[in-house]
Amino acid sequence: SCDFAPSGSFSPFRRLPLPAKRKYMRSPLSPEMATQEVPLNETLAHLKTESETLKLKLEEERAKLHDVELHQVAEKVEGLGQFVMKTRRTLKGHGNKVLCMDWCKDKRRIVSSSQDGKVIVWDAFTTNKEHAVTMPCTWVMACAYAPSGCAVACGGLDNKCSVYPLSLDKNENLAAKKKSVAMHTNYLSACSFTNSDMQILTSSGDGTCALWDVESGQLLQSFHGHAADVLCLDLAPSETGNTFVSGGCDKKANVWDMRSGQCIQSFETHESDINSVRYYPSGDAFASGSDDATCRLYDLRADREVAIYSKESIIFGVSSVDFSLSGRLLFGGYNDYTINVWDVLKGTRVSILFGHENRVSTLRVSPDGTAFCTGSWDHTLRVWILMC
Amino acid sequence: MAFGSQLYSWITQVVLPHFVFTDNIRWGGVMGFKLEGESVDKGMMGNEGRLTQSQIEDILTRIQDETEGVPIRTVKSFMTKIPSVVTGADIVQWLMKNLSIEDPAEAMHIGSLIAAQGYFFPISDHVLSLRDDGTFYRFQAPYFWPSNCWEPENTDYAIYLCKRTMQNKTRLELTDYEAENLARLQRAFARKWEFIYMQAEAQVKKKDKIERKILDSQERAFWDVHRPVPGCVNTTEMDIRKCRRMKNLHRVKKSVYGLTEEGKQSQSPIHTFFQHCPKGTKEDVEKEISFLKTQLDRHCMKMSKVAESLITYAEQFMDYDPFLTSPEPSNPWTSDDPTFWDLEASKEPSQQRVKKWGFSLEEALKDSAGRELFLKFLESEFSSENLRFWLAVQDLKKMPQEEVAQRAEEIWAEFLAEGAPSSINLDSHSYERTSQNLKDPGRYSFEDAQDHIYNLMKSDSYARFLRSNVYQDLLNARKKVRKPFNINGF
């Protein structure tokens, strides 16, 4: 027998050579100095100092407005009683880790994607599978349902986001009508339709987000600013807004203006990758979940972290978060196979849910808030409700 | 596009990703078959596990502390001694006390996860979970901890299985899946089996009885993690998005027994993926400075005000949140009856839904029935062109790129041009800006105008709408008082 391993001579994989470290660099600013080599370190060091000073000043200014904690003001709010939540549907059919899911606007259908390349559309209410597509790549990390309910988008290690129109004819091969929309230079981590079937917003391991026109595949806007992989995004819920938030491996959550491509706000308080971001239903704040085992709430008007949801006994990362309809509850799916339910205002945990047999990788509340769905590395999806 | 580059694209984008990340091929080891429990995406080495790992290791140190930890002792059993063990119940109790856990089920769960990662293990079986009873557990040697970045090779696994067969103890007999694995490895490593056998023999010969008991069990627990029992969760599996940025690349340990593979790199191709160029160029810092200056100019709200606002919103929508207030007639998921959804979709909105339109203009416009009623009201006031303009611009933004320019011009003609049939009133500034934008019409050409009109409706017509007969009649149609449940008990 032979041992198969990539040896030095035969390497079928593209390798980007790392940039050589250069101590001196030509200054690009003034043509007269073109032939002079300016020591890179000096000017850069000055700028970095200026940046650090500004950061400190900004923190000072923000701290002045931090007159009270959210949970303190929330003491006057009535406490939530005992919650019992149970799995009401279990969807079996994926042959490997479920990585992502999304709800249809009809409040009962969902699309899910998994590591084995399969994308399945279910009527979760009846648990029937309605469509299935096999992607040409494994690790389909992102999927989304179109607002019309007539198409789904998905992608992953193929670095693309493709749209599949859903046919009423069950026998029709969906892959035939597939449309390639987005092209990134690294894996697709998340995708979402805007409020129309005609535009898709994507985030990628290449560190960027992008807005695409579905019909033509044209790039409408790109968003640069993250210093590492972007793992998640969420569109602001407002009818009038044009913003979205993204989270990345650089521990930052950035808020973007879709029109200009500019980053308008940035938050960096997590201690590790941000795996999930979701807006508070009013659109004035958003929650994040991270590998540092905490969820946090950031308010856009205060431009600050306003709450942190953590416990000594929770030491595994958060993979996904979503709010209940009123924003009072925050559901978090964790890498320790559980779901923790948080009282957003008081900062306490109201429930811990067991059931999945491996990591919870994705979690979304249904469009009318009647249930939430989780997907897991145990190959299943579960729909959870409040028992009363 | 030339055939060559098409082929290249196809290879790199379609063939290779599948080729690399399919579970059927194990890099750096044996080709062709997958050993039970093996996966390409291995290792707790990436960033995602780092913080969790250090938390666990902190717990491990504290739990074995002489004064503050669990009682670890040697237990006499039949004619033998069982060294260095602690009961599951003791561990559960310690976790509850030291991690502030109230429910023993939670302590068992997190304990089981820590065990599954290989930090402690039951001495009598292969199943790495924590039981709240007298079952004996032993702690894993730091040498075998996941933070040492183990990616043990199949040669090591072969040596280990060989060792097991050399000891004539029933408790060390190979299980079915282990026997199968050994058979496969013997076929795959046929050429170097003598080497493997000799290594195994050499290792079996040393150490005193007690020390060997402990080491044997720790070694076995290590392999239970890296070659798990079929059906058990493989805790060394990783999220592929996090694999690439492994900081401990150079620290990856491949051989448990100190062997080195003959002249092979044995690096998983995952490790050779693109690295992000480190940020910190002058341009980046300049951008950052400019951004920070903008942030400093931002006018922000006080926390107290922000808190009030978040609370107000949550309280306002409490009645509409199915996790706080039961939907009527029932939650479809609970009762398996979709009537609730049918009612929501019907043309006759419930009183509760009508009430929501009064919360904000945004809420009224979100709901198609609310939009319709508001439009009807505006028509009665002969000011419907404002809402129609706003809706037209919303639609414009949803259109395919190709159709945008033309639609934008149509909107201009309908609402803003001189002598427009549905002329809207804009302030001169917005009008100027919009007119300029239309020179190069795009989906955001009407943003200023749309904002202005929205604010106009919000401050003027919307308030009158709420006081109007059409709205009030609908609102008061059914005066039913519904109590929200689940506040301080049922």
Image (cartoon, coloured by chain):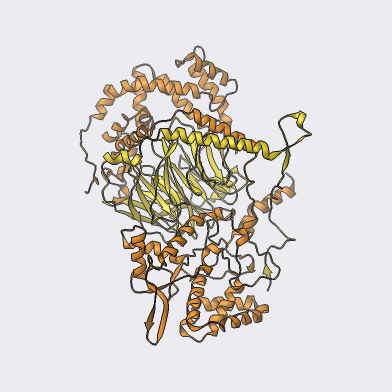
In this view of the protein, can residue B370 be seen by the observer? yes
The relative height of residue A107 versus residue B25 in the rendered view (above or below) is above
Q: Residue furthest front?
A: B67
Query: Which chain: yellow?
Result: A
Q: How many marks?
A: 0
Relative image position of residue A286 (x, y in whole percent) = 43, 40
Answer left or right for B230 relative to A183: left
Q: Nearer the viewer, residue A76 or A41?
A: A41
Relative image position of residue A52 (x, y in whole percent) = 55, 37
In this view of the protein, can residue A196 be seen by the observer? no
Q: Nearer the viewer, residue B378 or B464?
A: B464
Chain B colour as displayed: orange
Quadrant location of residue A380?
bottom left
The relative height of residue A136 versus residue B220 in the rendered view (above or below) is above
Q: Quadrant of the N terminus of chain B?
A: top right
The relative height of residue A137 versus residue B199 in the rendered view (above or below) is above
Answer left or right for B437 relative to B63: right
Q: Residue furthest top?
A: B419
Relative image position of residue A355 (x, y in whole percent) = 37, 59
Relative image position of residue A304 (x, y in whole percent) = 44, 37
Answer left or right for A7 relative to A366: right
Residue at x-position 52% and y-position 15%: B417
